[in-house]
Structure formats: structure tokens, C-alpha cells
Amino acid sequence: MSNSDQIQRILFDQIDVRGVVARVEGSYQEVLSRADYPLAIQRVLGEMLAAVSLLSSNLKFEGRLMLQAAGEGAVRVLMAECRNHTELRAIARYDGDIADDVAFNELLVNGRLALTIEPDNGSRYQGVVPLEKPTLAGCLQDYFRQSEQLSTSIQLVADGQRAAGLLLQVLPASDSGDADWQHINTLAATLKDSELLDLDNETMLYRLFHEEKCRLYEPQPLRFHCDCSRSRSAEALKMMTEEELLQLAQEHGGVVEAGCHFCNEVYRFDETDIRALFHEVGQLDDSDHMH
């Protein structure tokens, strides 16, 4: 049986198509518990978490895969991230009221979608496409068609409690004709949102592709995780001068606070901490010790 918060790859034995299915529940709820998001944003963040889970599964290295949508409307930014294939987090920034039924591309006026890959060892890569489709899945398919030139089918759904996604893609450098891809894509298009959310992976795979020779890999777990830390917050504070930080601390009861927007963790730095940042060798760790 399939569990929540996992990805599972699909292997087609006789055609050059790869597939991945993602299910996100506990980590999705962790994201939503950090802020009181409108329903439309809850749904999009769920879809983005499912999307980065799917896309990260194709990476052959450790690092971050980030999906960010930005625009000029009430919603300023939507962002989801998957680190090391398993660790998820997401955030939204918006102003005012958001209607429950607003389309994805209407949330961000003149919006653009950026897919960023940051390997732990290697060069950063980013691809950008305009938000021209009414759904996140449609915009991602545009990205793969324009930037990667790979035939790709993506289905995403989220209801504020659970999120799920299915990705099918022609293998790079595939010599197969279009017939196999069109056949698989046509079958996948019959999948309903309710089925993607409610069916376990084995049942869904059988309903869609029971005439094909395909099977599921072992599932890989997903979880919510924020890699913020006191030491990283300290390094961010050093963008200001010692004098500026000391003045700021004086104005706020002797303490400067640095908060993480993803998990709402707050790190506090007093005068001693601030002076240590600039006059002692090393960094403040999470126990206030220099290292």
C-alpha cells in the first residue's frame, strides 16, 4: 500500500518513458500550520510541494530544487523547495483578500515561473517561463517544452489537506517514435483529480496502464524540514555593520531578532552575541558557542 509523504518511480519496460508519482500530506500540513493562508494559496502551495517532489526525483546529485512564481499582483511570491530529494518546505507572500477560485496565473499578474537547481557541488542553474497557463501543471509543461524540449505530462492536485502529482516524460535522447508517448499521455489524461488524491499508487497504476508492462520502484519518503539555523541567521545579520546592529538592539530592548519565514523560528542576538560576530574567530552555533 502507498503511504503519505513519498515519491515512487514508475518503470515502463518496453517504452522510453519515465514516470513518478508523489503524495504529500504531513509535510503539506506542516507548511500550512505556519501561516493562515487563503484556500487558493493553500492549494497552490500543495501543488508546488508535489511538483518539486516530482522534479527533484530526476536529479542525480544532492542539492536544492526550488520552484518560485513571482508577479505584480496581490500575490508577490510563491515558493517551494525540495532538498536532497526528501526535505520539503514552502512559503507564500501576498497582500489583501484572495478569492477561493482564482486561477494560478491570475494570482500573479505579469508573473513568471522560475525553476532553480543548486547542487551542493556544482553550478547553479535556473530556467524561467512566463505564467501563461491557468494551472501550475500547464506552466511547468510549457517550461519543459520551451527550456528542455522534452515531451512532459504533469498532473497536480491539492485540497488543503493532501497533495499529489504524476509526472510522465519521454527519456532524453529517446529514439522512440511519437506513438508510444501519445498513447501513454492519452491514458494519463483520463486520470481524475479525485483518483490522483484518493487511490493508492498500485491501484492508480493498474487503472491507467494495465495493458502496459510497468511497475513501481520502492517508495522514497518525503518530510517537512527547514534548514535554517542560528549560525546562518548570524551570517545574514553580518550584512549590517556592528554599529548598526548594536543600535538596532538598543532600540528593541537589547536584542536583535532574526526570524525564518519558512518555519517561524526566531533567533535572538544580544549585545554580547553581536560583538562576538565581529570580533571572535568562527561563527555562533546554535548553542551560542563560537566554532
Image: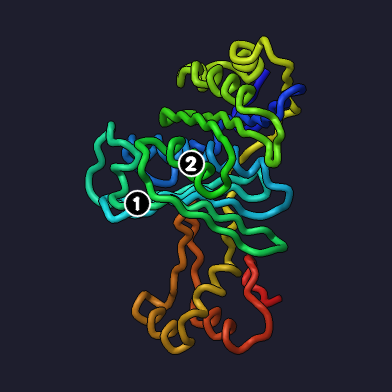
Residue wearing tag 1? 111
Crowd around label 2: few <14 · some 14–19 · many ≥20 (10 Å): many
Q: Residue at x 39, y 36 (%)?
A: 135
Residue 105 visible to the viewer: yes
| Residue 226 position in % (x across, y down) | 57, 52
Is 290 on the left or on the right of 185, as rendered?
right
Q: Secondary structure at mark 2?
A: helix
Q: Residue at x 67, y 77 (%)?
A: 290
Q: Nearer the viewer, residue 77 or 3?
A: 77
Q: Quadrant of the C terminus?
A: bottom right
Three-letter code, disc 1: Gly
Crowd around label 1: few <14 · some 14–19 · many ≥20 (10 Å): many
Q: Residue at x 58, y 66 (%)?
A: 230
Based on the displayed image, in which of its 4 quarters is residue 33 positioned?
top left
Q: How many marks?
A: 2
Q: Quadrant of the N terminus?
A: top right
Residue wearing tag 2? 140
- Marks 2 and 1, the one that precedes in the sequence: 1
Three-letter code, disc 2: Leu
**Figure coloring:** rainbow
Q: Nearer the viewer, residue 163 or 172?
A: 172
Q: Secondary structure at mark 1?
A: loop
| Residue 234 position in % (x across, y down) | 55, 73
Q: Is residue 246 above or below residue 171?
A: below
| Residue 153 position in % (x across, y down) | 54, 31
Spatial separation of the CA atoms under disc 2 and disc 1: 13 Å
Residue 8 visible to the viewer: no
Is 65 on the left or on the right of 251, as rendered?
right
Q: Is residue 258 above or below residue 161?
A: below
Q: Is residue 213 above or below residue 233?
A: above
